[in-house]
Amino acid sequence: MADIYFGEGGSDTTGDGSLENPYRSRDGAVAAASGSDVLVLLDGINEVAESDGYWNLAENFDIRAQTPRKAILRPVGAYDYVARTSPALAASSNPTIVRGVVVEAAANSGSAFRFEQDDAEDILLRLENCEFKDGINWTLYIRQKRGTCQVYGCKIVNSTATQAFASSPLASDIANATLDVNQLDLELSTTTNGDIGVYVQKNDTLTYTYDVNMKGVNGRMDFIGQSVGGYMVFLYGVVAPKFSNFDLTVSSPAGSSVSTWGIYVRSKATAKTTAFNISDGRIRYDSPVGYGIQAISDLASTGGTSGTISGVEIVGTYYPDQTPHNFACSEDSIVTVKGCKSFDGYVGYLASVTQSGTLIEGNLAFDCYGPSIYLKGTKACTVRNNVCIVTNKHVQREVGIISVTNQGGPSSLGGDIENNLIIVEDVTKIHAILQKREAGNVCTFSNNVIIIPDTVDVSTAVLFAYESVTANNTYAQWIAQTEVTDDVIIQYPLDKIKEMIAMYGGDYIDIKSTTEKSLVKLSSSGGVDNTVRVHYDRKKKNSEIMVALQRASEVIQERRQVN
């Protein structure tokens, strides 16, 4: 195996492939290579010297930069791509590897790099530690009807292409295909309507599978001046995609009225995005309209989108007259949201016209300035074992902390709100604690524990909304409703409540860390079967929560004995 050098300043006529006397073009290096030789692109700016006007990877020779991210490839003229794989690649020499190269597409090039796999060969292409920049349509385009594409430790910088990273609607068209991404850094800004950062889709059939696993996608996308919304990540019609260990920032101007999405999951008419798994990530959602994460079915079909969102933290931004949503399970989807954290969104967790089986469990909602958990026109949605914290940071707008209502025409049917913990620092700044908004909503409230300051007179304070837009029930009136069973108010001095609040997220602590948290479950024999996340690093405050829940159990026992 030998290294054969090529690049700017070399010669295909007099070069010999050594570092001192390199070839000029990749074609020149290929002509001299054999066996397992590696083609090495020289550091510096290298203009494409191939007769085609672009690199056409038709032979199974690995390519690497002389120094990672220091060897830059640029186009000369307008072409569909700066570099691409050719259908002539043979699977017998898998994998074909490109390492450490920077590929820069000019504003007149369709894409920086394109993986093109249309024929019968199951090619394995691996891109390692590369950087791709700009383009018109795509920056990195994966057009794989079959085969495997691996993207490891790469970066995309884009301000011109409509889609920075995209798979083709022909993905898995003629055979099973695989997309494996591990560590992809994004630096994206856009002024074009409907732009997408990462767009992963497949053909709209179920004949072949598209195995998508994306881990470690990190970066920022700024939406500036659009009149049509855009997406940082769009998963479309892919069965069982995995998207994990990410850190994303979505930003648009404060005065924007255009929706943006951090992660958008949707089904096609035939190819449903089922069994998706979004896990262990963080989104900084700094946009006045839209969603941190939304899962939705194709509106032209019936149902389809289903999966799990777990261990995800979304940090929103306060807007006085806008309603951004951090987590959303929408039309005809069936989603489990578990072990997540929502900070500073208008809506913490939304379930809207979802199908039976949607579950919102074991999550934290902290300082949502609308509803922490919002059920709108849902079917058999369960909300349990969540913690909702409302400090005096914002004045809560329009909706209760946990609210059940209609979505347009459909009423919520079968919403079960049970075993949740709600801590309120200042009841004068909330709209309502619990709310059933319309008479047609079929829902139950049971074993919810509410902690409020001991200065509140619960016999007269109107804190609950029953078949009302605004609060109209005292605590006694609320627990007398037929839909309510064993909801309990526990009162504490304000300083104790502040200690409890600090435990749950005043500094955005990581509730997933196994060294910091445990699950405390009170015995159901006391009337409360309530799971609450606590942190061992603050034992005193943990004990306060446990005491409060134990007191709630005692209150329920006493009430039952009286009755």
Image (cartoon, rainbow, N blue to C red):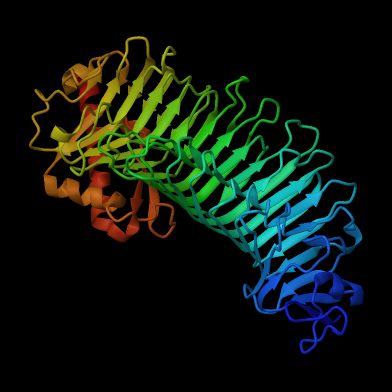
Say left or right for 55 vs 530: right
Residue in the picture at 15% in, 38% down = 426
Q: Is residue 181 left or right of residue 534?
A: right
Residue 430, percent from left and from top: 20, 32
Examine the rendered structure and indicate whether residue 473 appears above or below residue 422.
above
Could you tell whether 261 is left or right of 537 in the image?
right
Give the image location of residue 8, x and y in percent: 72, 77
Q: Relative to the observer, which residue lies in front, 360 or 384?
A: 360
Residue at 67% of width from left, 38% of height from top? 238
Q: Residue at x 32, y 40 (%)?
A: 255
Position in image of residue 406 (x %, y %): 38, 17
Q: Quadrant of the C terminus?
A: top left
Q: At x 18% / y 18%, what residue is drawn?
A: 473
Which quarter of the figure has residue 234?
top right
* Rendered view: 54 above or below 415: below
Place residue 196 in its image quadrant.
top right
Give 279 or 17, whichever is nearer the viewer. Answer: 17
Front one among 280 and 446: 280
* Residue 145 seen in render: yes
